[in-house]
Each structure stands twice: as structure tokens, then as C-alpha cells.
Amino acid sequence: MRLFVPLVLSVIVALPTLAAQPFRAVNRLYVYPLTADTFEVIEDRGAGARGIWCAASDYTKSAGRDGPRKRMYILEPRRPSKTVPGRNGVVFTLNPDERLRNTPSSYSVSVNRKGENLPVGHAYLFCDAIIDDLFDRF
């Protein structure tokens, strides 16, 4: 019993830190879960909009949240990060409210406008060039 209580307490203390661990996308950008349906992609390595959408889709697929018609929506456009001080990030949601869901479509790929959205599969296509570059090195 003396060993059991400290073990249980250490597990309870460790659980919140495990939940806050970032996901590292195929393009090496970090993604931090915020809630069950929202997450933040941290801008890094000179990644532009395509790289950020790639990381968002990779996270969504890895979390098993993709589907044939699943879309990702920008909840908070590019701005100072909520999770990493001194960095910029973009917050995405998989469960938009009605106003976000009705945002007019755009032909450009951007991370600067709230409501921009893409299907997960479409955004994941932005990762293909990154994966090809990795294999071209060998």
C-alpha cells in the first residue's frame, strides 16, 4: 500500500503533461492540441500556408479525425501563438459553428483569414512535395 499511493499520485501528476505534448507533423512543424476539436500549428522553418495546412491535415489524419468529407477550418488566423511564446501559430477547428461553416470559399491557400477551410485530403496533398523531397535525398 505504501508503494501504491505514490505510484498513483505520480501518474495523476503526469497525465496533464502527457496531454499537452505536441505532435510533430511530416514537415516537422509542431501541432498542439487545444481541445478535442481544436489545435494550433506553430509556424516554423519558413513554412508558408501550404506547409501549415499540411501539418494540420497530418495531425488530423494521425488523430483518426479525417473522413471522406471532413474539413478543417481556421478558427484563429496567423497571429502570436497561444502555446509557444514568441512564435506565430494558426488555430484550426474540426467542429465549426454555423458562421464559420458558411464562410465563402477562396481559390487561394491562406492562413490569414478566419473561416478559410479545406478538406483534410486536399490539404494533405500539400505534404506530397515534402515527402518526395525527403526520399530524393537517398
Image (spheres, rainbow, N blue to C red):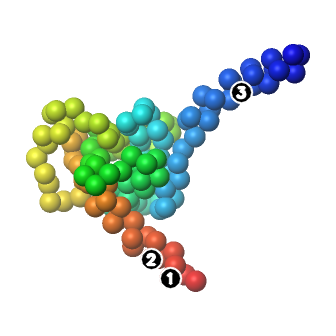
- Quick check: can you spot residue 49? no
Disc 3 secondary structure class: helix
Indicate the quadrant containing the N terminus: top left, top right, bottom left or bottom right.
top right
Q: Nearer the viewer, mark 2 or mark 3?
A: 3
Kindly identify which residue carries mark 2: 132
The quadrant the C terminus occupies is bottom right
Closest to the observer, 38 or 83:
38
**Image-quadrant location for residue 16:** top right
Q: Residue at x 43, y 48 (%)?
A: 64
With respect to residue 14, does 131 lie above or below?
A: below
Q: Nearer the viewer, residue 64 or 72?
A: 64
Placement of 36 over or under 1, stated as above or below: below
Q: Nearer the viewer, mark 1 or mark 3?
A: 3
Kind of residue at badge 3: Val
Amino acid under disc 1: Asp
Q: Nearer the viewer, residue 61 or 104?
A: 61
Q: Looking at numbered disc 2 in the image, what kind of residue is underneath it?
A: Asp
| Residue 11 tag number | 3
The crowding category of the residue bearing disc 1, from other C-alpha atoms within 10 Å (few below 14, some 14 to 19, many at least 20), is few
Gap in angstroms between the C-alphas marked 1 and 3? 43 Å
List the residue tagged with mark 1.
Answer: 136
Residue 55 picture location, percent across and down: 42, 55
Which is nearer the eye, 30 or 87? 30
- Using the rendered image of the protein, determine whether residue 119 is visible from the camera's viewpoint: yes
SS for callout 2:
helix
The answer to whether residue 84 is left or right of residue 102 is right
**Where in the figure is residue 52, as x and y percent of width and height?**
37, 55
